[in-house]
Amino acid sequence: MKALQIKGYGNIKNNLVISEIEKPKVTANEVLIEVHSAGVNPVDYKIVEGALKKIQKLTFPAPIGLDVSGIVVEKGTNVSHLNIGDEVFSRIPSESPGAFAEFVTVESSVVCIKPSNLSFNESASLPLVGLTSIQCLKKANIKNGDKILIHAGSGGIGTFAIQYAKSKGAYVYTTTSTKNVAWVKELGADKVIDYKKENYQDIVSDIDIVFDTLGGNYTVDAFQVIKKGGIVVSIAGELDNESAKELKLNGIIRLILAIKRRAITKQIKKKSAFYKFILMKPNGNQLKEIKKLTEAGSIKPVIDKTFSFPTSIDALIYQKSGRAKGKIVIKMK
């Protein structure tokens, strides 16, 4: 079968290649999925560039791709909730990627029947952004009437998170560039802030939750706009100690991280706030929640551009450009 593989760390164009490899074999708890579509995410090109090698070092050539939608063609002896011929979607565990290929094996517990009203392309666009948003906002205990700021509303995670927060009855502030303001409003955001013309800190104040997708100064500044006892959940800020332990980082590294997040720690104490860096995990039950929300019309996939498999390297280059409105998808079949 054909598969996109990482040859080594470095430049995207020079370190990815489409290779002919053996079709993977299922174990007792896995299913073999014939891939119809695969979702592209920023983490994909970051892996190629070596940004995550301190957490997970690759052996080359290495597979790539975490979001998949396709058809079950084989299943292991212990798999009972899925059948051959089922149309499914999944966020593949990071330890066993490979969505950018004609076939991929996936632990069956993190595989779900795809939404009946969505195409394979649309279904493949949802797992990572959907699970990330749900796990972040569940950690923030989002509820009806909460006021939340979601940064980067036109990105893959932003487009899903806005819709999910609205499904929970929250009042949503979001930031985007001038050209995307009207489009992001259509997603349901209550107040769209044009960061090229406005400073969100002049508009947002005393809110319940900030969903930080940008990191850096945005993480520290989030504490300026939350209320006393407010919540900041992040996928881009500094690691908290609990998350560092989840990654099994040693004591010296955790000490370095504690020093790096001193500004955040100071703000947490000042605001009596809660801060958590979220390490998203594949979750079959939460995929069922995404399925239910999309079938009810509460969540609609947002796809910016679709690439063919032979042009999949271009898909990752485009993802890195930061120009995408919503998600990028590779159509395999």
Image (tube, rainbow, N blue to C red):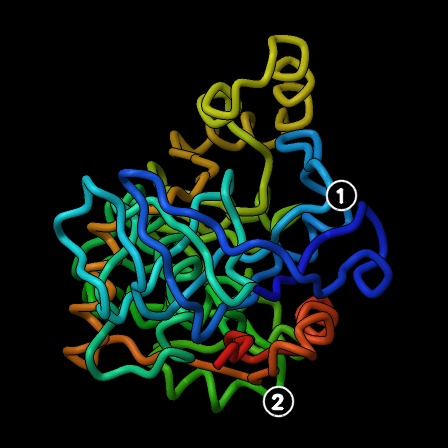
Q: Nearer the viewer, mark 2 or mark 1?
A: 1
Kindly identify which numbered label has been placed on residue 136.
none
**Mark 1 highlights which residue?**
50
Describe residue 25's horizontal placement relative to residue 43 as left or right: left
Q: Position of residue 27 (x, y in %)?
A: 34, 39
Q: Position of residue 273 (x, y in %)?
A: 39, 34
At a point 76% along the width and 60% down the height, the residue shown is: 16
Q: Is residue 48 above or below residue 306?
A: above
State the residue at coordinates (61%, 48%).
215
Could you tell me residue 70's position as x and y percent?
Answer: 36, 70
**129 relative position to 87: left or right:** right
Q: What residue do we see at 66% from left, 62% from top?
A: 20
Q: Amino acid at mark 1?
A: Gly
- Above or below, 111 against 37 in this view is above
Q: Identify which residue, 279 or 162, lies in the foreground.
A: 279
Q: Residues within 10 Å of mark 1 (few under 14, many from 20)?
A: some
Quadrant where the N terminus is found in the figure: bottom right
- Which quadrant of the figure has residue 45? bottom right
Q: Earlier in the sequence, mark 2 or mark 1?
A: 1
Q: How many marks?
A: 2
Considering every residue shown, the one lying at the far front of the view is 22
Element under disc 1 = loop
Task: Answer few, some or many: residues within 10 Å of disc 2's Cα (few below 14, many 20 plus, some between 14 and 19).
Answer: few
The structure residue drawn at horizontal position 31% and vertical position 64%, both measured from the top left corner, is 73
**Mark 2 secondary-structure assignment:** helix
Q: Above or below — where is 229 with respect to 218?
A: above
For this rendering, which residue is in front, 201 or 292? 292
The disc at residue 179 is: 2
Report which quarter residue 178 is drawn in: bottom right
Looking at the rendered structure, the kind of residue marked 2 is: Lys
The answer for how far apart the CA atoms under marks 2 and 1 are is 32 Å
Q: Position of residue 105 (x, y in %)?
A: 41, 51
